[in-house]
Image: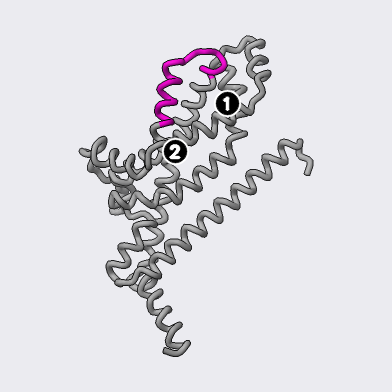
Amino acid sequence: MNLQEFFLSLWNRFDKAFLVEDRWKLYLEGLGNTILIALMATVIGVILGVLFAVINYVNKKTGKFKVLAVLSNIYITVIRGTPVVLQLMIMYFIVFVSWNFKVAIGSFEIMDSSLLIGAITFGLNSAAYVAEITRAGFEAVDDGQREAGRSLGLSTAQTMWYIIIPQAMRNSLPPLFNEFITLVKETAIVGYLGVYDLGKIPGLIQSRTFDYLFPLIIAALMYLVVVMILTKILHVLEKRLAKSDRGGKI
């Protein structure tokens, strides 16, 4: 085989994996599902993670919420100490075994039970890591801020809501955004539930072309491009936060 035939063979394989029968649409559909799961998981993870961090912070500083603090620490330990793929199987085959629904707008299906279960699982998993991220953010806030709030007559809840949490979340933004980037990649295992995310599409294409090389390469490149874009956004965010810390001076 000469060089021209070699490149022609590669093109034909790429054509079958990406262009024939508009298969590129499958990759875009898979990418859309991947981003949707990551976004939903991030929302769930941030809400629960911040709640756990607040409970632990208040317990540490005031001695309140002792029972809740113990329960949140047990949750964080269990979630961080077990593989997410096992958590996914438990949620799908045990906790939500009776779930079976689809959500559609007209003829366009936007979500089914498997996708939602995947998002919930990754959200619950992410919450344990977000709790540790935001805990560090809370610890970075000077104790004088809490004391100042209390001296002004604010309750513990008001001090947390108006003074501590905004500063802690600002400190935690870069690592939280990095957690979202991690979720985009980790959600590839949701294909175990039959969800056609970007990690599942290469197998679907291979079943039609009997060639794994280009479907896998195309999916990997799409993941890479998305992660590079998100990483660039993260760098911009970090620079703006650093500039703000210096009072607007570069």
Residue behind mark 2 = 126
Q: Which mark is residue 125?
A: none
In the image, what residue type sits under mark 2? Ser
Point out the image quarter for the N terminus: bottom left
> Is residue 67 within the magenta segment?
yes
The location of residue 203, given as percent across then percent down, is 32, 62
Q: The residue tagged with tag 2: helix, strand or loop?
A: helix
- Does label 1 or label 2 sit earlier along the sequence? 2
Q: Are marks 1 and 2 in contact (CB under 8 Å)?
A: no
Q: Residue at x 29, y 49 (%)?
A: 193
Q: Residue at x 33, y 40 (%)?
A: 87
Magenta part of the chain: 58-77
Residue 125 vs 9, above or below: the answer is above
Q: The residue tagged with tag 1: helix, strand or loop?
A: helix
Q: Residue at x 58, y 38 (%)?
A: 173
Tell which tag, 1 or 2, sits nearer the viewer: 2
Q: Which mark is residue 165?
A: 1
> Is residue 191 within the magenta segment?
no
The location of residue 45, given as percent across then percent down, is 45, 36
Quadrant hosting residue 246: top right
